[in-house]
Amino acid sequence: MKIGITCYPTYGGSGVVATELGIYLARDGHEVHFISYAIPYRLNRFHKNLYFHEVEVVDYPVFQYPPYSLALASKIVEVAENVQLDIIHAHYVIPHATSACLARDILEDGSLKVITTLHGTDITLVGQHPSFKRTVQHSINKSDGVTSVSEYLAMETRQAFTITKDIHVIPNFIPTNFLELQDKPISIKKHTPDEPFIICHISNFRPLKRVKDIVLIVEQLVRRFPVLVYMVGDGPERSLVEYMVHEKNLKQYFTFLGKQDRVSDILLNSDLFLLPSESESFGLAALEAMACGVPCVTSDAGGLPEVNIDGKTGFIVPVGQIEQYVRQIQMLRFDPELREQFAINAKKIAFENFHPDNITPLYLNFYEQVLNRE
Ligand code: GMT
């Protein structure tokens, strides 16, 4: 098959999933063409069957805002004609699905099918903004096939929009750089009273991640036992959160690491992963923690309970319930047997339910279904 993939190359889980999928498809012998404004950061080495096409946005004095969506559509048309693409797979609706549908319509001959994968904020945040809502709805309904990364997101999409298309759920999968950890034995620390309990948080520090909750949780935890929190990632609320930590005299308990390439090294040194988001379609970072054998304490937002199984791989806490987070984390700190059981379950469930060898063929089957529909 000849598959085009368009995605955000640098930001967030949608780009990671798109890139990992492309690498898998190329390894499987399919010809994969990435189309974006920059090379996805995980495509930083040669892969057989994998190509990159850069979208160049023409600048012109009348363009107050350079029209990326149109430039992307034009590039998809060019690549589709040059290499005879069968599929263009758009990750994130705005602008990728919209541009992909436009490209297909420009081609006019029905040779190109559009698959759109819904990732989260394209539906829950950006998608429901009045200026985008109808465009998002149109782009979903005009796609030839639509997938969602969780049952929750499929349901949310059906509720928020008037959807005429089936939405096929294909969950996210463990990124390749975590697969080597499958056979690594799990080691659970039994803490001495002075030894800090290590909590890891990974996010883009957007308001919907509720990173400030972590400060409120830690403020209470440190009255009971020593804690060290690795804060991984960067984004709009990082400075605010650092300031809050300073104001509350909690600096010694936090290490802000910024963006990191090998988060597995940090997770493997952590006792627990904490994700208190108020919206999360899936929670790829939680899955990465589980693949490392790290128990998770997450909110009950969105698709998180489909990944972190309450009472099995960790705990699920209602969004914003600080006292409950504190209780659950404390329980795990003082019960290493429970933590070990959760760690074992987390790793088992991650590799059994979310192994790329099991998930990526689901995309291929779906492409085939869409191509064979007529
Ligand atoms: O979490 C973010 O803000 C980034 C965002 C993205 O668009 O890359 O992540 C979304 O897609 C990921 C991959 O499918 C999911 O694991 C995240 O849960 C989802 N984020 C939200 O729904 C907030």
Image (cartoon, rainbow, N blue to C red):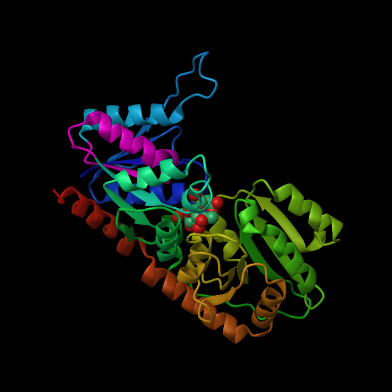
Whether residue 212 sits left or right of residue 65 in the image: it is right
**Residue 37: x and y, percent?**
45, 32
**Residue 312: x and y, percent?**
50, 80
Residue at figure coordinates x 35%, y 51% from the top left: 21
Viewer-side residue, 186 vs 39: 39
Whether residue 14 sits left or right of residue 204 in the image: it is left
Tell me where residue 214 sits by quadrant: bottom right
Viewer-side residue, 139 vs 39: 139
**Residue 85: x and y, percent?**
23, 37
Q: Vertical placement of 358 versus 186: above or below? A: above
Viewer-side residue, 28 vs 330: 330
Residue at figure coordinates x 61%, y 72% from the top left: 318
Viewer-side residue, 133 vs 167: 133
Q: Which residues are magenta?
A: 85-112
Identify the image quadrant of the N terminus.
Answer: top left
Residue at figure coordinates x 42%, y 41% from the top left: 135
